[in-house]
Structures are given as structure tokens and as C-alpha cells.
Amino acid sequence: MKKTLSIFASVVALVLLITGCSSNLETKKEKTVVKVASHTAPMTDMLELIKDDLDKEGYKLEIVKVSDNVQANVALKNKEVDANFFQHKLFMQMFNEGNNANLVQVQPIYDAVVGFYSKDIKNINDLKDGADVAIPSDPTNMTRALRLLAEHKVITLKDPNSFSVTVDDISENNKNLKFSPISLLNLNEAYNEKDLVFNYPAYITKIGLSPEKDALIVEKTGDLTYAVSLVAREDNKDTEMVKAVQKALTNSKIKDFIDNKLNNVAKKAF
């Protein structure tokens, strides 16, 4: 009888040990890491906001900070990250065409209020003859800048509805403006050197300016063509991982952030 009880106790102890180990393994089970590339606020701020939401879904969000926009797309193309969050659809398409890539827009998140700024004048009508105007050097943002000038009748474009515009498509330039194409990330430096500078709020706020208070002109209407979006690849756009990030970036927390923290500099695109 004692021998039987001893064997029974041993079995129970073994079962408890196995159960305990199994429980510990489940507790210590690592979450799936999802990597999203970005490089500046407010995109990185939004990603920080959704870390807890993704954690509850079983994912650990790793924000991969890059030095420029091209690097973020190269990393995504090369499968070094699972998605990125910094660009609009037209910029993505331009990268695809030039790099034989298959990046896809998963979800528009917000549309930034872009504008033109000047250190010297307070009204666009005071722009001097022959003024030097800094515009983005990449084709899609150059188009956006020139369309904005045309919208406010500073220049006239041959086709004001085109999303593929260069300075060669200007039909009227009554003030003989000179246009200086500059890398998007260097436009803040151009503010001190040029008479007029195009810029995004994500960059211009770094030198203490904002669209609401300081821009001479801003876009009047937005059709979300230039909405900053979550971007993935064709091969992973429908994965549970990417869908989880999409869901988190369109939750009430992000809506409140855009409405309250980005008030007057951006609007929701979802």
C-alpha cells in the first residue's frame, strides 16, 4: 500500500512539473516581431502609440528608423522590414517604376497640409520678380508643389490636373520665378537661403514653423492622393501581421491623435 501511494505521489508530482513547465513556456513564448520603417514624427509618434495594441494581438512592434525616404523603400523591397510608414501612393509608385519593386499601398492614414514658407515676406502677392523658389527634387513632390502654386495663381500650368508636372510644364510665369529643386529632407536648410520654400509640416515644425501660422499658401482641397500611407509588399500585404498593423493605425487612438495633436496640420485619410 505504501509503495502504491509512493508511486501515485511521484506520478502526481511529475504531472505538476510538466504542467508547470508547459505554463512557463507559454508565458515566456516570444511574440512575433513586426518591423515597420519610418524616420520622423508624426509617423514615428503614431507607431509608438500602437505598440501596446499590437502587443495585445501577439506582436512586438519594432520601429526601424531610417535616414531618408529611399532607404525605407529599399529596406521594404529587400524584405528587411515588413512595412513602412512615411510616403504617399505616388511616391511609392515612382519608386516601384525606378527599382522594379512591388510595393503596395495598404492603408492611407493621414493627409498632411503642405504649404510654402518665406523668411522675408508675409503675403504671397509680395513675392518679388525673379524670386528663387525651392521645390522638392523628386518628381511626385515637385508636382505637388507646382500644383499648389498654380492653385493660388502664382504660376499657370499647361495641365493643372496632371499628377506628372515639372517646371517645363509651366505655361505662365509672370514673376519670372527661378525654381531650385532640392531634396525633400534638405528643404529646411533652404528656408534660410531661398525666397520661397515648399515643405511638409513633419519637417517645417522642426524649425518652429507651422502651416496654420506661418505658411503663405496651403492646399485648399485634398483628394487624399498624397495621403501618408502604410505600405507593404505584394507578397505580404494580406498577412495577419500587416493586417494587425493596419487595424492598429486606424483605431480610435490614432484618430484622436490626428484630430488633437495634428490639428490644422493634417486630416484623417481613413
Image (cartoon, rainbow, N blue to C red):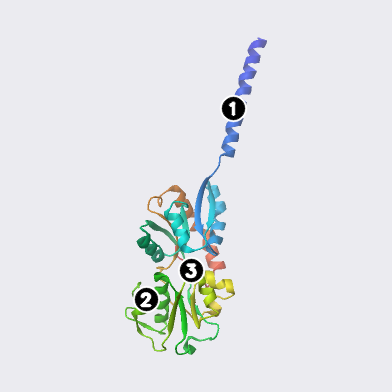
Relative to the observer, which residue lies in front, 165 or 51?
A: 165
Q: Is residue 137 left or right of residue 205?
A: left
Q: CA distance from mark 3 to mark 1?
A: 54 Å
Q: Earlier in the sequence, mark 2 or mark 1?
A: 1
Q: Nearer the viewer, mark 2 or mark 1?
A: 2
Q: Earlier in the sequence, mark 3 or mark 2?
A: 2
User: Helix, strand, or loop for circle 1?
Assistant: helix
Residue annotated with mark 1: 18
Q: CA distance from mark 2 to mark 1?
A: 69 Å
Residue annotated with mark 3: 267
User: Helix, strand, or loop for circle 3?
Assistant: strand
User: Helix, strand, or loop for circle 2?
Assistant: loop
Can residue 263 be seen here? The reply is no
Q: Residues within 10 Å of mark 2 (few under 14, many from 20)?
A: some
Amino acid type shown at disc 3: Lys
Q: Quadrant of the N terminus?
A: top right
